[in-house]
Image (tube, grey):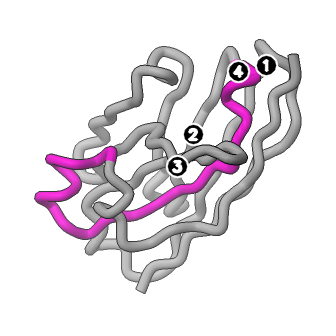
């Protein structure tokens, strides 16, 4: 079993930065990918990006590429999402997720169904 706990959300003005954290508890050797998703009020959940814990390779949605960076601290079992140049349209609840299926992680990292475990979310609000 894996538990994920996000933190670091808050309110920031457009152009600012925030760093979200996701603490990972439980049996981590079975994790094949870690992802960040977000969901704005009244909208569908959106994939933000994914990291392969084994080789640190990352993939991002086009809407956040070059602004957001996913990293991990294996010693602390923590995943990070560094968000720079924030825009009002980045306002959403942000969730981290962990997937245990290699095929899903490699072929469909952008699909929520790839991930077995989810955190409770942390709110990010960007004002103009």
Question: Can you give x and y, in whole percent of width and height, for residue 126 in the image?
Answer: 81, 28
Q: Give the residue at mark 1.
A: 16
Instruction: Compare marks 3 and 1 and give the one earlier in the sequence.
Output: 1
Q: Which mark is nearer the camera, 3 or 4?
A: 3
Measure the C-alpha gap from mark 4 to mark 1.
6 Å
Say what secondary structure mark 1 lies in: loop
Density class for disc 3 (Cα within 10 Å; few <14, some 14-19, many ≥20) is some
Residue 13 in the figure: left or right of residue 52: right
Residue 69 in the figure: left or right of residue 113: right
Q: Which mark is residue 86?
A: 4
Instruction: Compare marks 3 and 4 and give the one earlier in the sequence.
Output: 3
> Considering depth in this image, is 125 or 72 the residue closer to the camera?
125
Residue 90 painted magenta: yes
Q: Is residue 127 above or below residue 33?
A: above
Density class for disc 2 (Cα within 10 Å; few <14, some 14-19, many ≥20) is many
> Considering depth in this image, is 32 or 109 the residue closer to the camera?
109
Q: Quadrant for residue 16, please give it.
A: top right
Instruction: Compare marks 1 and 2 and give the one earlier in the sequence.
Output: 1
Which of the image's four quarters has the N terminus? bottom left
Q: Give the residue at mark 2.
A: 81
Instruction: Compare marks 2 and 4 and give the one earlier in the sequence.
Output: 2
Q: Give the residue at mark 3.
A: 45
Magenta stretch: give its range: 86-110
Q: Which mark is nearer the camera, 3 or 2?
A: 3
Instruction: Compare marks 4 and 1 and give the one earlier in the sequence.
Output: 1
Measure the C-alpha gap from mark 3 to mark 4.
18 Å
Count all numbered tags in the image, as a single digit. Answer: 4
Q: Residue, x 45% and y 79% (percent of image)? A: 2
Say whether marks 4 and 1 touch (CB < 8 Å).
yes
Which of the image's four quarters has the C terminus? top right
């Amino acid at each position: 079993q894996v538990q994920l706990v996000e933190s670091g959300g808050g309110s920031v003005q457009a152009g600012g930065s925030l760093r979200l954290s996701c603490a990972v508890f439980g049996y981590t050797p079975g994790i094949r990918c870690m992802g960040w998703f977000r969901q704005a009020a009244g909208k569908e959940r959106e994939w933000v990006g994914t990291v392969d814990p084994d080789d640190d390779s990352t993939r991002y949605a086009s809407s956040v590429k070059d602004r957001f960076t996913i990293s991990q601290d294996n010693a602390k079992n923590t995943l990070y999402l560094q968000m720079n140049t924030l825009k009002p349209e980045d306002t959403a609840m942000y969730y981290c997720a962990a997937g245990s299926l290699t095929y899903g992680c490699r072929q469909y990292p952008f699909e929520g169904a790839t991930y077995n475990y989810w955190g409770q979310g942390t709110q990010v609000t960007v004002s103009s």
